[in-house]
Image (spheres, rainbow, N blue to C red):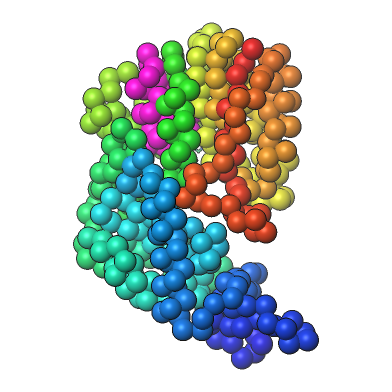
């Protein structure tokens, strides 16, 4: 079959005996040769139109508290390697394999018909496109898209740089966890690995003070700007390496009532798993030492390779080394607009545990 198929073709997959297994996207360069779409019509306009409408109907049913969220989450919406994020009146799309990229015009047309956005940006600068021999480009593909877009998450407004921000501008997968943290937070709070302040801003509405820390100058400036525009005067946005800063805070005998840890994926692959677990343990151990008795730690990992059991085990060992007794309050996942597809374990990547120090 590979001899006949062109890069990005929609192909029919059969067993050796000829039993049909469904449709798939073919890639000529990636290790993932076939991305399954399952059964469906061969007419691509009908196929993609149906799947898109189903994805949009699901987000409508969720009625998110805000106007920035994921509309299409690739495999989990039956549209492999396609991401569509909504930022208010604008859309940001990512076509991350040869097949979804080849159909960008059709996808833009269907999105235009269904949602009538003011503009659509293709944020196709993700490194993963290299595996598909695709160029890294950022391009307005419909209407006009401003440099900065104001969106709402709960009662907080975020100003988003959709062209240069991390991911497509915000960590939308943490949207519901930001809101949950806002409910748990009290007293003096710490948001470590804050990015634009998704957690810090929600917590500041309830807390006496919030210290946010990130290593990116752009992110720290964005927290300060977002705080000002939301009328929040109790956030200090600090530029620092979290590993160093947690140690400094401990030496200075600082203590917190609420702590959020949301690091980048330390385990990018299986080979780096052991080192990654060491990193997770170090920050969790230090956070537990900084936490007052009765305090809440909201600790996250977006490493797919660190599954829930490994994460929980790491947390237990961090607690033992910190001489802390810790009770599990809640296990959370990525926001519901990023569905987990049973049978595709890679779609379950974000863990967010809420624990209480006794
Ligand atoms: C997963 S993102 C955080 C997302 C954020 N909590 C949110 O919900 O929007 C990880 C952040 O960690 C920052 N970062 C990575 N390594 C760091 C380090 N060693 N010290 C401080 N910040 C770091 C990155 O700049 C990035 O903003």
Tell whether 239 sits left or right of 151: right
Residue 165 shown left or right of residue 354 in the figure: left
Q: Give me the residue at 55% from left, 59% from top.
A: 76
Residue furthest to the right: 17
Q: Looking at the rendering, which quadrant does residue 292 occupy?
A: top right
Q: Can residue 12 be seen here? A: yes
| Residue stretch in magenta | 192-211
The percent coordinates of residue 11 (x first, y second) are: 58, 83
Compared with 260, 208 (above or below) is: above
Query: In x, y percent, where is residue 277?
Result: 69, 36
Q: Residue furthest front?
A: 61
Looking at the image, which residue is at 38% across and 28% down? 202
Task: Report which quarter residue 194 is drawn in.
Answer: top left
Residue 212 visible within the image: no
Is residue 31 placed above or below 228 in the rendered structure?
below
User: Where residue 299 appears, x then y in whole percent?
Assistant: 57, 30
Residue 24 higher or lower than 64, as above or below: below
Quadrant, the N terminus: bottom right
- Residue at image position (67%, 43%) is 306
Give the residue at x 27% y 32%.
225
For the image, the number of numbered tags is: 0
State the image coordinates of residue 136 (x, y, percent, origin top left). Answer: 42, 65
Apparent side of residue 240 relative to residue 35 in the rendered image (left or right): left
Q: Residue at the far bottom: name it.
A: 4
């Amino acid at each position: 079959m590979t001899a006949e198929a062109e890069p990005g073709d929609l192909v029919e997959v059969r067993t050796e005996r000829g039993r049909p297994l469904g449709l798939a996207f073919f890639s000529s360069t990636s290790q993932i040769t076939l991305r399954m779409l399952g059964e469906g019509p061969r007419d691509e306009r009908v196929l993609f139109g149906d799947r898109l409408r189903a994805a949009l109907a699901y987000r409508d049913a969720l009625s998110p508290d805000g106007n920035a969220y994921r509309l299409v989450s690739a495999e989990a919406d039956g549209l492999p390697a396609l991401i569509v994020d909504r930022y208010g009146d604008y859309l940001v799309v990512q076509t991350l394999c040869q097949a979804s990229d080849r159909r960008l015009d059709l996808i833009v047309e269907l999105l235009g018909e269904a949602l009538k956005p003011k503009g659509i940006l293709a944020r196709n600068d993700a490194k993963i496109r290299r595996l598909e021999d695709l160029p890294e480009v950022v391009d307005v593909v419909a209407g006009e898209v401003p440099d900065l877009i104001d969106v709402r998450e709960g009662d907080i407004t975020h100003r988003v740089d959709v062209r240069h921000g991390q991911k497509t501008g915000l960590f939308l997968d943490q949207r519901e966890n930001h809101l949950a943290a806002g409910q748990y937070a009290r007293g003096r709070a710490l948001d470590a690995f804050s990015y634009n302040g998704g957690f810090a801003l929600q917590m500041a509405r309830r807390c006496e003070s919030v210290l946010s820390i990130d290593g990116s100058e752009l992110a720290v400036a964005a927290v300060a700007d977002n705080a000002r525009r939301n009328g929040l005067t109790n956030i200090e946005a600090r530029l620092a390496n979290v590993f160093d800063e947690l140690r400094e805070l401990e030496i200075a005998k600082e203590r917190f009532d609420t702590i959020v840890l949301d690091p980048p994926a330390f385990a990018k692959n299986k080979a780096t798993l052991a080192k990654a677990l060491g990193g997770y343990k170090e920050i969790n151990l230090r956070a537990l030492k900084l936490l007052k008795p009765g305090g809440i730690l909201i600790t996250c990992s977006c490493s797919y390779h660190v599954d829930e059991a490994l994460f929980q085990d790491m947390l237990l060992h961090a607690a033992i080394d910190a001489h802390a007794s810790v009770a599990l309050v809640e296990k959370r996942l990525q926001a519901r607009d990023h569905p987990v597809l049973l049978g595709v374990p890679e779609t379950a990547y974000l863990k967010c545990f809420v624990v209480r120090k006794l």
